[in-house]
Image (cartoon, helix red, strand yellow):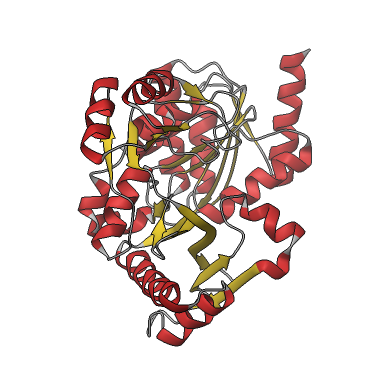
Amino acid sequence: MNLHEHQAKGLLAEYGVPVPRGKVAYSVDEAVAAASELGLPVVVKAQIHAGGRGKAGGVRLARTEAEVRAAADAILGATLVTKQTGPEGRLVRRLLVEEGVAIARELYVSFIIDRSTGRPLCIASAAGGMDIEEVAAESPEKILTVTVDPAMGMQPFQARRLAFGLGFEGQVFKNGTKFLTALYRAFEGLDASQVEINPMLVTEGGEVLALDAKVSVDDSALFRQPKVAALRDTHEESPLEVEASKYRLSYIKLDGSVGCMVNGAGLAMATMDIVKLAGASPANFLDVGGGASAEQIENAFRILSSDPAVRVVLINIFGGILRCDRLAEGVIAAVRKLGVSLPIVIRMEGTNVELARRMLEESGLDFTTADGMRDAANQVVQKLDVEAA
């Protein structure tokens, strides 16, 4: 689950990470009142779940009350288009009004989970305030990394090593090590999958602050993070993804035309790969899980088929915990109830597969059964070609 910048900063501050003073605003008048309370100058920032807001006109410096009002009026209600939003952009529904600070240096730091080691990884660079991917590609020597043992936590010598590598000296060095240590505590305490500070700011007075903050929390840990879960902003998510979450379904909208229903993330990835290899593109990632009920299957099918971009449905199930006959029952019920007219290709293997195939055949509905994943992908492409013709 992603958080807005103001939400992320509020949580980081609770762990001792220094952040600029700021207030959230939902209207122009609230933005002006916030600026008056904080004192001018201020920075008016759009709050959406995407980076690149500054380049899209979503971050503006305001030195007077009139400039605050003009900036808030221009940003609030606007649709920002950045590299991360896609061409459709994101509607700005809230602002962060933040005190202006005197900038001496801009740096970068983040904590992520390194999947190759299964441990937290700190990535830092003296080149902050810009896309870290560009830095890594053009100047990899500017990237510093430290792997943290989760049983031990971030050690003081690791924070000092990073601070030295970032060129900190004197009081800035002390403030920087405290900042890095507190940031790791927040990463761990929030069950975060990513905490990114870009830029990490050194002020002219020697303070080290999180000028921007991006925090993503592991969805699987939200049951023990009720405070974080309460911050969810469904306006920033696809409506179909929000609907899927109500039924504990893993759904991600993609750009293709083949709706994929699969049980198990690994099988889902393999399914999307073979669809691409066959010459088509998946419209979604939809994992119904290992123990889905007929009701969940029906809801999954409803969500999948309600996407107007979907032209063919591919169901690829390995019947283990989720028996093939239970899948067939749910799919048949969904097609009858929803009146789905889309071509449906089904590949099944596992528990009660013969019973499931018989149920599909005797349903009287137009299902195409496939013998293996490659055949399923080829059947999907044929159906797309027929529809196009």
- Judging depth in this view, the residue of 3 and 286 nearest the camera is 3
Left or right: 333, with 140 as reference point: left
Percent across and percent down for residue 44 are 39, 33
Q: Quarter holding the C terminus?
A: top right
Front one among 249 and 346: 249
Name the residue at 55% across, 23% down. Answer: 88
Image quarter for residue 115? bottom right
- Observer-nearest residue: 281 or 334? 281
User: On screen, 209 above or below 253?
Assistant: below
Q: Nearer the viewer, residue 59 or 195?
A: 59
Query: In percent of the image, x 39 and y 19: which residue is there?
Result: 70
> Can residue 324 be seen here?
yes
Outermost top residue: 389
Answer with left or right where residue 92 lies relative to residue 373. Answer: left
159 relative to 346 in the view: left or right = left
Q: Residue at x 71, y 70 (%)?
A: 141
**How many dots with numbers?**
0
What residue lies at 36% left-to-right and 52% top-to-bottom? Answer: 219
Q: Do we see residue 306 in this rendering? A: no
Residue 153 placed where, x, y %?
38, 80
Instruction: Measuring from the top left, give residue 43's x and y in whole percent.
Output: 39, 37
**Where is residue 28, by image quadrant?**
top left
Name the image quarter holding residue 97: top left
What percent of the width, then of the height, locates residue 109?
51, 63
